[in-house]
Amino acid sequence: MADEKKAKKAAFKYVPGGKFCPKCGARMAAHADRYACGRCNYTEWKGKGQ
């Protein structure tokens, strides 16, 4: 159990300059085509120019 938690933490990478959710203020996850908030489910789609 403890080894699984360590592996999950090691897989996480901090991305500087990330976006924050305009609705709840949480850090948003950066996907290839969108930014998504895990707390309130707010989603911003990335455009072709980004």
Image (cartoon, rainbow, N blue to C red):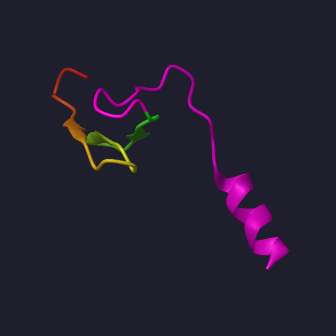
Residue at the outermost left position:
48
Is 23 rendered above or below residue 37?
Answer: above
| Tag count | 0
Which of these two is toward me, 48 or 11? 11
Q: Residue at (39%, 50%) from the top-left corner? A: 38
Q: Is residue 11 magenta?
A: yes
Residue 42: x %, y % from top left: 25, 42
Is residue 5 shown left or right of residue 19? right
Residue 15: x %, y % from top left: 56, 31
Q: Residue at (22%, 35%) from the top-left corner? A: 44
Which of these two is toward me, 16 or 26? 26
Q: Residue at (39%, 49%) from the top-left corner? A: 39
Prevalent SS, magenta region: loop
Q: Which stretch did the figure color magenta?
A: 1-25
Residue 19: x %, y % from top left: 40, 26
Residue 37: x %, y % from top left: 35, 44
Quadrant location, the C terminus: top left
